[in-house]
Image (cartoon, grey):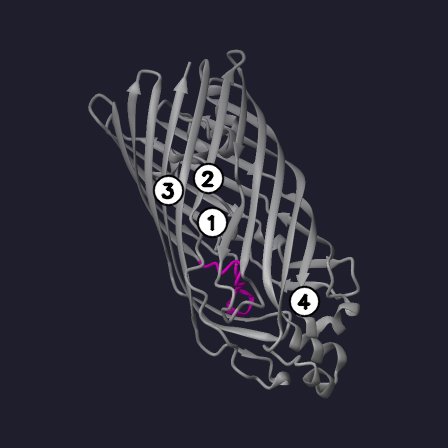
């Protein structure tokens, strides 16, 4: 399932902001995540700031079969196997940020984080094995940035991104169905024992890519209590070069001349750009409110096309994702001495998946509702500790997806996610 945010976005870039559902992210000047969320705010850091954070992600995603079946052209028999177990994988995600004041108007920042990712694993004999068994996509992003204070109230910033993407995808291959599709001769396939669901093989794709992008933002402080922020992160194109390895049952070797052999693979994908708007206001010494809205250009992802160097045809997954909005609000309560800060937040995060026909077993995504809580403790005058917890609620997700070997996965997913994080900020 997606690790954290809708689609395959990873929102977890600040434990402090996690506690208020990231509602204050574009106006935040208190931790180093401004490098990612709004580099325009970096000019408000004095001296040097280091933020180090880690998150434990505990997702749960279970499939309940309804009427999964082969294509009517192949008899329409029910797909064999179980429901796949809980496909959610426990994950750990770190991020590190450094911000340094260069002059009274100029600041430098650097970020190391993970902006996109997904990870899930099904039991190898489940009904949807021809669509997915293991799915792992993870990005690592390096983000140097500069910020310039135009006036005491208004500042701008920009950054450059170098992004490394690594992927691993596995699934079963129905060589029985492949035989019928390739040879168009039921008797020949039956004599070889190559009938649908009777001769499973295995496919594994491992690859990586490097892409480049940029981000910029603007920050405006109306006064010491009211702040506004807006930022943009560019799309990043990846050409993922992979090695495809096949396990072919001995009775299916007659098909290897038609492309079911180890080969090189190219998959092109453009990860989306987004725009983030935010507002925060401190009402009095004890209470503050924040809100933001995030637009993500997921409609860039219409399909995932895998091009094989061997003669076999391209593997195409039609996704037809839609653009999305994410809305969040948060509240902070400050203790009398401000040694403790307590916060909570709520967010609604739209899914880019349009319908059950385009929901993938690799990304069985649905809209999610974030409920979060967190705290900040001033351990020393220049050292803060942040902790946060989030629970993500998701409605059951229907799936009616046709795989590349003409099987239909029909049922629904039940999903939820728990997230915990700790962070240290050090100013020096």
Taking 393 as reference, is 214 above or below it?
above
On screen, residue 359 versus residue 286, left or right, reads right
Rendered location of residue 54, percent (x, y): 42, 35
On screen, residue 284 versus residue 62, left or right, reads left
Front residue (pair 94, 322): 94
Tell me the quarter of the picture where residue 32 sits: top left
- Give the mark, 1 or 4, whose residue is nearer the N terminus: 1
Mark 2 to mark 3 CA distance (whole Å): 17 Å
Which residue is pictured at 54% across the width and 45% down the height?
A: 116
- 364 falls in the magenta region: yes
Check contact, mark 2 vs mark 3: CB within 8 A. no
Disc 1 secondary structure class? loop
Which residue is pictured at 54% across the width and 61% down the height?
A: 133
The magenta-colored residue range is 353-366
Of marks 2 and 4, the one in the foreground = 4
Disc 3 secondary structure class? loop
Of marks 3 and 4, the one in the foreground = 4
Check contact, mark 1 vs mark 2: CB within 8 A. yes
Disc 4 secondary structure class? loop
Residue where numbered disc 3 is placed = 21
Rendered location of residue 196, percent (x, y): 62, 79
| Mark 4 Cα shell of 10 Å, populated few (<14), some (14-19), many (≥20) | many
């Amino acid at each position: 399932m997606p690790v954290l945010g809708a689609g395959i976005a990873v929102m977890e870039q600040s434990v402090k902001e996690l506690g208020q559902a990231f509602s204050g992210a574009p106006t935040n000047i208190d931790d180093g995540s401004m490098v990612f969320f709004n580099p325009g705010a970096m000019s408000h850091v004095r001296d040097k700031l280091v933020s180090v954070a880690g998150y434990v992600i505990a997702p749960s995603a279970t499939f309940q079969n309804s009427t999964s079946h082969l294509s009517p052209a192949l008899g329409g028999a029910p797909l064999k196997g179980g429901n796949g177990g809980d496909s959610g994988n426990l994950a750990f995600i770190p991020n590190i940020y450094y911000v340094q004041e260069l002059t009274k108007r100029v600041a430098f920042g650097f970020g190391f984080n993970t902006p996109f990712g997904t990870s899930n694993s099904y039991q190898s004999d489940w009904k949807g094995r021809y669509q997915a068994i293991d799915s792992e996509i993870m990005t690592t992003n390096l983000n140097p940035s500069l910020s310039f204070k135009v006036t005491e109230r208004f500042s701008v910033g920009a950054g450059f991104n170098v992004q490394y993407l690594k992927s691993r995808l596995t699934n079963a291959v129905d060589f029985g169905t492949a035989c019928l599709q390739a040879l168009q001769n039921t008797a020949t396939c039956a004599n070889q024992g190559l009938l649908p669901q009777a001769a499973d093989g295995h496919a594994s794709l491992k690859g990586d890519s490097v892409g480049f992008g940029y981000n910029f933002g603007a920050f405006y402080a109306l006064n010491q209590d009211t702040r506004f922020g807006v930022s943009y992160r560019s799309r990043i194109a990846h050409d993922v070069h992979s090695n495809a390895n096949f396990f072919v049952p001995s009775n299916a070797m007659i098909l290897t001349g038609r492309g079911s052999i180890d080969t090189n693979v190219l998959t092109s994908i453009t990860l989306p750009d987004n725009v983030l708007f935010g507002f925060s206001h401190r009402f009095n010494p004890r209470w503050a409110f924040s809100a933001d809205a995030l637009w993500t250009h997921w409609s860039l992802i219409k399909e995932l096309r895998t091009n094989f160097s061997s003669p076999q045809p391209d593997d195409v997954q039609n996704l037809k994702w839609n653009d999305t909005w994410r809305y969040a609000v948060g509240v902070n309560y400050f203790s009398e001495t401000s040694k403790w800060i307590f916060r909570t937040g709520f967010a609604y995060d739209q899914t880019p998946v349009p319908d059950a026909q385009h929901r993938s077993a690799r990304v069985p995504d649905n809209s999610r509702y974030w409920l979060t809580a967190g705290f900040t403790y001033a351990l020393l005058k220049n050292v803060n500790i942040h902790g946060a917890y989030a629970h993500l609620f998701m409605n059951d997700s229907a799936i009616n997806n046709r795989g590349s070997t003409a099987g239909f996965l029909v049922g629904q997913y039940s999903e939820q996610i728990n997230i915990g994080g700790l962070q240290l900020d050090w100013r020096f």
